[in-house]
Amino acid sequence: MKDVAIIGAGVTGSFIAKELSKFDLKVVVFERKLGPGLEQTKSCSGIIHPFQLPFKLLRSKLCLEGNKMMDAEAEELGFEFRRVGLITVATNPLTFFAIPLIVLYLRFHGVKAKTLSKKKLLEMEPNISEKVYGGVFIPSAGVVNPVEMTAKACMFARLNGVEFVYGCEVVGIDNKVDHFVIKTKKGDFKARVVINCAGIYADEVAKMVGYHMKIVPGKGTHIVFSERGFTNHLVVAIPLKPNKRTKGGGALVSFDGKPLWGPNLVDVESREDTSVKKEEIEGIIAKFSPLFRETPKEIIAVYAGLRSIAGRDFVINEPVERFINVAGIQSPGLTAAPAIAKMVLEMVSKHLELKKKKEILKPVNALKSEEAICRSLSDDEIVCLCNMVTKRQILSVAEQFKSFDAVKQITWAGMDCEKCKAEIMKLLGDKILKDLEEEEIAWS
């Protein structure tokens, strides 16, 4: 019997697994995809938010805590994290005169912020339109590769004894006197505590133990441009009236320096609808283009992901004894993940003794800088020229996660043009197979 079963290996479930792995517990994680972070997590913006409005919400509190923890998490796990900072731009006199109040309000809630004159703003972002009035700079905002961040948490957890079962959908849960029986497509498992991190399907998992809630899928589309360095910071316009449902997206920058615009928010019926429509792309470009002198010229990718919306806030509760809900984790869930893990750890401690392990192992992290890659070229070779990904990096990830999507999302190989896809397939040789049920490229 396991002490804890986690359903879902998105960023939240993976960080909870990472924290639990530091204690003498038997932990198992079930994930229906063939690798970690391959549903909602992979389709988010990769933004580490500096704050979330309104400050009274649980997700705002956990966002602030998670942001402060991120440097230490990146150091412990070895994922790339850059604090690029956020610039909120005043595009009219009303929002310009509101800047002093905005700065005071943010500082009152513990967020570092400073006023930017028009001159200073244009120095920091030369491509910004001359029509702006000024802005606010918030230095704590950052960017990550969300799947790399998730995978590194899984690697840490697995190194410290957590079992991961991929390609394993949970189909039922029986509540016994002192434990649960988790029914999956790969057999039945027993666990004393169950943690529901099933993302867009969290309401269906909760229903298995008699708790009724509703997850509403909200689709968000992103546009990726080729021009690295078009902006150096995350850029958004100060809204005249904040939207209660969404922060509204922005002219963002991805962890690899490319412009990333979006997301929008569109209500959809299907939990599998990640389609991208022409009018959505046109709407995003029309929304953010006025912030700049000109629009980036080359679109290299568009993609959409789903938010799991369960009202305005996160749903972190224990509706049934020993069954912990971590549901409705919409934005800023990526930022909040380390803080959510600490919160859930406290909830688990009410049912299980948390005895710290004498020795906690840490993965050996490969250097990812271009300088390090160049030094290693004598016994390695670059496979993806667009993103400078080497053969060794690809094989290292492929050994850990048996899915092409995981390799692509973690290493960023083939994310721009996919010209190296055939070369990656060649590297893996006769291990390649097709997972017919999931329709994914995988290997044994």
Image (spheres, grey):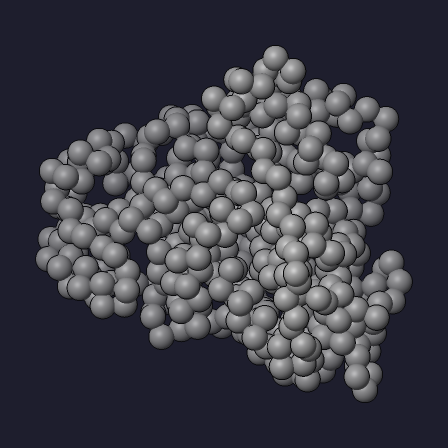
Q: Residue furthest right?
A: 187
Seen from this angle, which residue lies furthest bottom? Answer: 177
The quadrant of the picture occupied by the C terminus is top right
Left or right of residue 407: residue 44: left
- Residue at 46% of width from left, 52% of height from top? 72
The image position of residue 265, as x and y in percent, is 46, 55
The residue at 86%/26% (across/down) is 430
User: How many numbered marks have been drawn onto this rendered protein structure?
Assistant: 0
Residue 37 appears in the rendering: no
Q: Is residue 316 above or below residue 338?
A: below
Q: Does the rendering let one see residue 352?
A: yes
Residue furthest front in the image: 358
- The image shows residue 235, relative to residue 194, as above or below, that is above
Indicate the position of residue 342 as horizontal and vertical percent values: 53, 67
Q: Looking at the image, which residue is at 39% across and 58% down?
A: 68
Q: Residue 253: image x %, image y %?
A: 39, 39
In which quadrant is the N terminus drawn?
A: bottom right
From the top left corner, tell me how far across and down residue 297 is, in percent: 38, 26
Query: Where on the picture, by quarter, is residue 208?
Result: bottom right
Nearer the observer, 218 or 188: 188
For residue 283, which quarter of the picture? top left
